[in-house]
Image (cartoon, coloured by chain):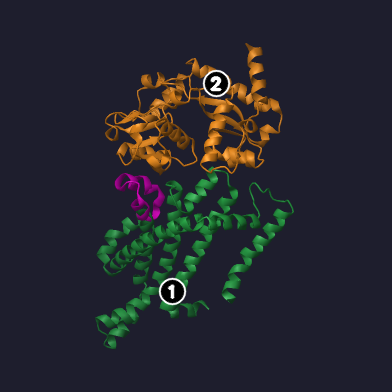
Amino acid sequence: MKRAAWGLWLPLTAAAIWQVAASAGLLSPLFFPSPLVLARTTGKMAANGELVRNAAATLLRTAVGFLIGSLAGLASGLWMGGVPSVRRSLDPVISALNATPRLSMLPLFMLLLGIGESVRIVVIALSSAVIVSIAAVEAVGGIHRAWVDLARNYGAGAWEMFGAVYVPAVLPQIFTGLRLALGHALVMAVSTELVIPSSGLGSMIWLAWQTFSTDRLYVAILLTAALGTVLNAGLRAMERRVIPWKSVGQG
Amino acid sequence: MIPLLASGALDVAFASAVPASLNAVAKGARVRIVAAREVAVPGCIHEIYGNRKSFPQGLTAGSLRGKRIAMTAPTSLSAFLLDTILASAGLGREDVRPQYMRVREGTAALVAGQIDALAEKDMDFSSPEIIPGPSVADIVPGFQYSYIQFGRNLLDGDIQTGAAFLWAFLRGVRAFRSGKTPAVFDRLAESGGMDPAVVRGLCRNRFTIDGRIDPASIQRMSDWALSKGFIPARVEAAGLIDNRFLDQALRRMKEAA
């Protein structure tokens, strides 16, 4: 509860100031519709199912792309981290992909895969895979030699080494990578919807811009931001459960 | 573009009477259509292009049924033009498979065969695999596509400034139509890897010579936008038009002649 209050006071204060400024006529309603107007628009869009339909489309794309990309990134990252020759071979590829704007590859993927849902998923998955892969490589590289030696001296077998040393050591960094990747997955989902605007929050933003419906534009952007916050909070909650020792150091 | 025009970030926009323009005017924004630019001319401009493999018998309005057709947005001029073409064959958007994407991606997808057709006017495709479809000029003779729109800085400023802009534009149009600007075509040919002679021969009369606005064309788009739910209420064409600048520019041209 206390955590939620800390997270909410700033946006609520901003909304209150915005409302006061709008009511006082200091902001043009054409470009800065008041929070009350936005609340009414949100209500209308929720009532006719538009919000849920588009948010669900974006969420589904984000989830599927993130899941596929994270698994691929985790596998490749652990492999690269554990086998030096693999790391030397794949590192330039991962670095190159990391430096290339993923959205710029969209036309290429469209030529290869067509214009269906798969092309969006590939772009989102690629984005997640690169981030998780880099995090996993760093995580494996950061395992202290002393922990490994200590466990071996106490007679730990292969499975014990895996469960008691390697996994606990890499999980904190991997979770950081996953949180970053999830945020990027949402950004990529919305970005691809802006380019191929058939459904989703990006499509809503594009349509609102095309029709000069600023209230709808704000609602779609705020909903995207809220969705990102909720996804991040969800993953943080999972992180606290899976690796409780990490949060000790964070206070 | 229109929101930027309404905010004053832009002073002039070359745009159609798109739903953004209609909504801007309906909400009281200082955005107005001040002159016409392009008009549908038979045999001059095409509004839809198809991949030859998808239309072995030729691209007609009726042959679009069930096809994957790309356009930039459901609110765009290309969507309106597609609906006009479809309606001429008794079809609607529900009879085709619309795909929304930018022109750049749509062009690549069309050439690659990922879509069957692309609704976009005047693409000047040089690929033999791409064929043009029926022309809106045959369905709605004299339909005006696009306009010059002014934002609040010019609308509320000194009328001479806006009129001078239109005067210069119309002079450019007349020079263009009389074939006095081959450099434009040469640059276009060079950038697109096309034969300069073919490009120079493309029709030039799609630009209106006097910039006079056809309210019926605007009303047609307004009614379409209303029927699609892009605007909340009917917007009258007359409310979008401001003829002050064009009148002055044309007077000046007449005096100069």
> Residue B219 location, x and y as percent?
57, 31
Q: Which residue is mark 1?
A: A238
| Residue A96 visible in the current orientation | no
Q: Which residues are magenta?
A: A97-121
Q: Which chain is tinted green?
A: A
Quarter of the image for residue B64 reads top left
Where is residue A95 shown, x and y percent of the image? 36, 57
Three-letter residue code for mark 1? Met
Amino acid type for the residue under numbered disc 2: Gly
**Chain corresponding to orange in the figure:** B
Depth check: give the residue in front, B37 or A136.
Answer: B37
Badge 2 is on which residue? B172
- Name the quarter where the N terminus of chain B is drawn: top right
Chain letter for mark 2? B
Is B75 placed left or right of A158 in the picture?
right
Q: Position of residue A24 (x, y in %)?
A: 74, 54
- Residue B169, image quadrant: top right
Type of secondary structure dominating the magenta stretch: helix
